């Protein structure tokens, strides 16, 4: 996958704020798209909110879906560099938390230090034993419904199965074949946010992945707690360092 020099291809900003002191970059979950965060801009006046547009869906449906998560993070980081004149706060949910991790790593290699990384739908825990991706489409749909991010009627819709399910399957393959590596270690603070009823949270040894501070916030809800209760207060209250490019 080739990095695109135009940030507007990779990022969607529905509420531009030229005077914002911080930019929040939101990474969708597996099978998600930038539209998942369409309401966040008006609700977070302290930020200019940018949602990541993964290839292979929505406005980029004609492009191949990403196949390698680490490369996806590098491509997104390249697109973010022009926006790093103010502090960048990264927020990723579920698979998006890991894409945000790889994006943050590449940003730091490029001399751009993210101000904060929020890993949502993920908790501090040892890595589980890798499991192969289940290629059965019906099983994948049932899993989506069980997670709470997709209702049963939508999952059964032929249009959903024709247009959406293929990139959900592709994201699943990409995530399950991702080779977690402990380095490079981040310098930025990391906050994980996990629902108190989330039995499906991504597990990762987050404190070992950063030399910055680490905090785990437990909120009410399941894996998709943020549909009903987006973590706006946590994002707004987070301290961020000034933009630094070196």
Image (cartoon, grey):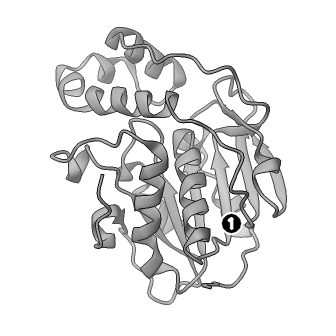
Label 1 residue SS? strand
Disc 1: CA contacts within 10 A as few (<14), some (14-19) or many (>=20): many
How many numbered markers are drawn? 1
For the residue pair 37 and 104, the one nearer the viewer reads as 104
Task: Residue 52: give x, y in percent of width and height.
Answer: 40, 58
Q: Residue at x 70, y 51 (%)?
A: 183
Q: In which quadrant will I find the C terminus?
A: bottom right
Q: Residue at x 84, y 61 (%)?
A: 213
Q: Can you say whether 238 is above or below 56 in the image?
A: below
Task: Residue 107: give x, y in percent of width and height.
Answer: 56, 68
Quadrant location of residue 129?
Answer: top right
Query: Is 101 left, or right, of 161 in this rendering?
Result: right
Task: Residue 162: give x, y in percent of width and height.
Answer: 18, 25
Query: Is 196 left, or right, of 178 in this rendering?
Result: right
Residue to which mark 1 is pinned: 116
Task: Residue 134: give x, y in percent of width and height.
Answer: 43, 13
Evaluate whether residue 41 shows in this view.
Answer: yes
Q: Can you say whether 72 is above or below 89 in the image?
A: above
Q: Can you say whether 9 is above or below 171 in the image?
A: below
Q: Can you say whether 217 is above or below 143 in the image?
A: below
Evaluate whether residue 220 shows in this view.
Answer: no
Q: Residue at x 58, y 47 (%)?
A: 97
Query: Is 217 left, or right, of 36 in this rendering?
Result: right
């Amino acid at each position: 996958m080739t990095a695109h020099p135009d940030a507007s291809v990779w990022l969607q900003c529905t509420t531009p704020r030229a005077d914002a002191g911080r930019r929040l970059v939101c990474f969708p979950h597996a099978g998600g798209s930038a539209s998942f965060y369409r309401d966040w801009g008006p609700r977070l006046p302290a930020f200019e909110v940018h949602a990541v547009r993964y290839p292979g869906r929505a406005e980029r449906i004609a492009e191949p879906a990403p196949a390698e998560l680490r490369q996806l993070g590098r491509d997104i980081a390249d697109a973010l560099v022009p926006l790093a004149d103010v502090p960048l706060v990264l927020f990723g949910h579920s698979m998006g938390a890991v894409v945000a991790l790889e994006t943050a790593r590449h940003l730091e290699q490029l001399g751009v230090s993210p101000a904060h990384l929020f890993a949502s739908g993920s908790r501090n825990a040892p890595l589980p034993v890798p499991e192969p991706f289940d290629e059965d489409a019906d099983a994948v749909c049932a899993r989506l419904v069980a997670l709470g991010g997709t209702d049963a009627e939508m999952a059964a819709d032929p249009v959903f199965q024709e247009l959406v399910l293929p990139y959900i399957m592709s994201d699943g393959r990409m995530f399950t074949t991702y080779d977690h590596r402990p380095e490079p270690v981040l310098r930025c603070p990391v906050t994980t946010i996990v629902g108190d009823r989330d039995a499906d949270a991504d597990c990762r040894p987050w404190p070992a992945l950063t030399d910055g501070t680490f905090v785990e916030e437990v909120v009410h809800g399941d894996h998709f707690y943020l549909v009903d209760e987006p973590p706006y207060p946590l994002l707004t209250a987070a301290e961020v360092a000034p933009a630094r490019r070196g």
